[in-house]
Amino acid sequence: MIDSTKPIDDATPVDDISGLKLPKGKVYSLKEIYIAEAHNIANSTLKYLSAPPSKKIAPFSYEWLSILHNEMFGDIWDWAGKFRTIELSIGIKAYQVPTALKELADDIEFWNQNKTFDIYEIATRIHHRAVQIHPFTNGNGRWSRMLANIYLRQNGSMPVKWQEDLLSKENPKRDEYIKALKKADSGDFSSLIQMHKITY
């Protein structure tokens, strides 16, 4: 069984900054990198969440899943949107990533066409599966949560509101989220589904 919560406490550490695209000539603190990432992510938030995105803008296709990650982190990292080639403390083996992400895109299409689940459960399953795959070197949690929010927004709901500053110990939903992810790892999505109904 894959543990989806292992790096939640402190996020995946940035040990290798060789792909950093910020201006050269200075040493950046982790906080400065996070702030730069947050500015980059804000552009995606405006694009996809300020109004319901069309399926042309957010098709949830295999190709678009990587495009979204690049849009969120591409101004900061040159590996944004590119599948990882290294093993992480969470996620499937790197060589399995392309197949698993294609299967996720196919499943999303099937769930939509067949109305297999309601929109909250589909958003939850997208979120959880994306975390378990962990396709990229970093930023996987934020990307997974963005996917869920885009899906909700596209299908008549509002974005989930408890996800802001999720890694902060001051976020009252943090522990609940970790417990819900652990339950989902065992096949019980009920708690995580309920969390995806807490929208703006």
Image (cartoon, helix red, strand yellow):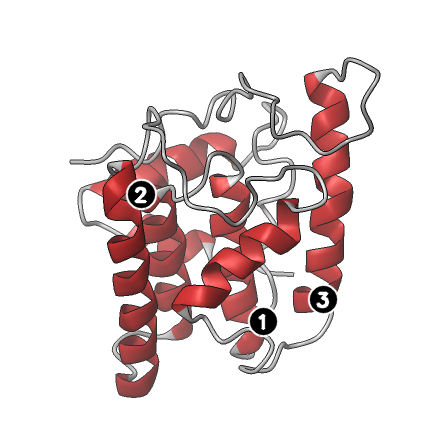
Give the residue displayed 25% in from the left and 63% down from the top. 103
Residue underneath mark 3 = 47
Dot 2 amino acid type:
Gln
Which residue, as the protein is rendered here, is positioned at the far bottom?
113
- Badge nearest the viewer, 1 or 3: 3
Q: Earlier in the sequence, mark 1 or mark 2?
A: 2
Q: Do the residues labelled 3 and 2 touch (CB within 8 Å)?
A: no
Secondary structure of the residue carrying tag 1 is: helix
Query: Which residue, given by chain and number where applicable, does mark 1 sit on?
Result: 153
Say which amino acid is labelled 1.
Arg
Q: Quadrant of residue 43?
A: bottom right
On the picture, is 187 further left or further right than 132? left
Q: Which mark is residue 132?
A: 2
- The residue mark sitting in front, 1 or 2, is 2
Residue 30: % across, % down: 68, 19
Q: Where is residue 49 in the image (x, y as percent from the top left)?
A: 67, 66
Q: Is mark 2 on a helix, strand or loop?
A: helix
* Nearer-N-terminus badge (1/3): 3
The numbered dot on residue 189 is: none
State if disc 2 and disc 1 touch (CB < 8 Å).
no
Q: Distance between the Cα atoms at labels 1 and 2?
A: 23 Å
